[in-house]
Amino acid sequence: MSKFKVGDLALLLMDVEQIKAGSVVELLMPLEAGRIVREKGGDQIRVLEHSWAFYHGEEPNRACGFCPERYLMPLRGDFQPEQKKAKEEAA
């Protein structure tokens, strides 16, 4: 089961074309392994593992890309590190 849903924000853990690791991205849609994706230039790529398509930046210069889920870090509550959750509960 994925730890993400459409519209979530995530931290990119690898460079994807011009989008650098450490950038915050908005998840657009999941891409299952085996799916064929068409790039901007028209080339087709087969997705090799469960991935997410995402947006980065603001209009009109918004970039789009995709990467394997393992290179995305969630930026919402349920997947915070356990130590931080424990501190919040104790307070």
Image (cartoon, grey):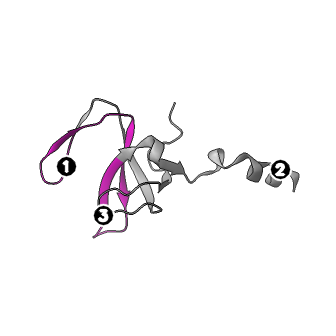
Disc 3 and disc 2: Cα gap in Å?
A: 40 Å
Counting other residues with Cα less than 10 Å from the Cα at mark 2, is it few (<14), some (14-19), or many (20 or more)? few
Q: Is residue 32 above or below residue 25?
A: above
Disc 1 and disc 2: Cα gap in Å?
A: 45 Å
Helix, strand or loop status at disc 3: loop
Helix, strand or loop status at disc 2: helix
Name the foreground residue: 53 vs 21: 21
Tell me the kind of residue under disc 2. Glu
* Residues tagged 1 and 2 counted as in contact (Cβ below 8 A): no
Q: Which residue is mark 3?
A: 18
Q: Which mark is residue 89?
A: 2
* Residues tagged 3 and 2 counted as in contact (Cβ below 8 A): no
Indicate the position of residue 62 as horizontal and vertical percent values.
31, 65
Residue name at image x 45 percent, y 63 percent? 23
Q: Is residue 26 magenta?
A: no
Tell me the kind of residue under disc 3. Gln
State the extent of the magenta-drawn residues as a range: 37-66
| In this rendering, position of residue 82 left or right of residue 89 | left
